[in-house]
Image (cartoon, helix red, strand yellow):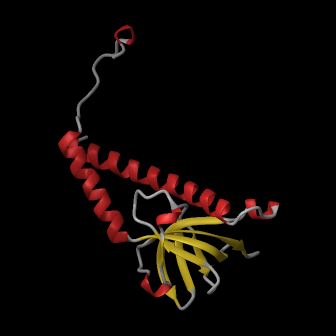
Amino acid sequence: MSYGKSVFRSVCFLSILSIGSLANNCSTAASQSQGATSPDSQATPKQVGTIQAIHENTVTLTSDSGSLVDVLVPDSARVVQMAPGQTDLKTATPVELQNLEIGDRMLVRGKLFDDGKTLIAVSALVMKQSELAKKQEQERQEWGKRGVGGLITAVDPSQGA
């Protein structure tokens, strides 16, 4: 495998980890910001995916597992946008559905319909595709500047190496 492919795969892996971590942090922060709630709210369904279509107040996501999910976003839902790398919802800015674009990433929490494919959103967190691409490019450049590539030929536990 070439050095460039190795760096690219490492950057992609780190990006996936940061999005997963962000999804976990955001769902925890959102549940904390709503105060004490019923036990049912702790099991609130969530979906993470890429926006495939937007029509009025319905967003169609391709979830990270590959399935299509229709998300109904009522006016009462809290929809915010965060920059990649941010972990504090206090810095998130409200965003309108008409400002979202196909390809943007979205984490949605809400109530799942019986069909298992439709979610009524309580809250949604969005990251713009263009901002994610910029962050990934910056990470790629950082790896190019400070990254080291090569094969490990020996390990000596007694030396800590």
**Number of callouts:** 0
Question: Observer-nearest residue: 68 or 127?
Answer: 127
Residue, x 67% and y 72% (percent of image)? 110
Residue 136 place in picture, x, y as percent = 31, 57
Residue 102 place in picture, x, y as percent = 42, 79
Decide: is 111 above or below 15. below
Residue, x 54% and y 91% (percent of image)? 56
Quarter containing the C terminus: top left
Question: Observer-nearest residue: 45 or 33?
Answer: 33
Decide: is 122 above or below 134. below
Residue 121 place in picture, x, y as percent = 64, 76
Decide: is 129 above or below 75. above
Side of 76 where 107 appears, left or right: left
Residue 112 place in picture, x, y as percent = 71, 72
Side of 97 where 144 appears, left or right: left
Question: Observer-nearest residue: 157 or 80?
Answer: 80
Question: Observer-nearest residue: 127 or 63?
Answer: 127
Toward the bottom, the furthest residue is: 56
Quarter containing the N terminus: top left
Decide: is 70 above or below 129. below
Residue, x 21% and y 51% (percent of image)? 141
Toward the left, the furthest residue is: 145
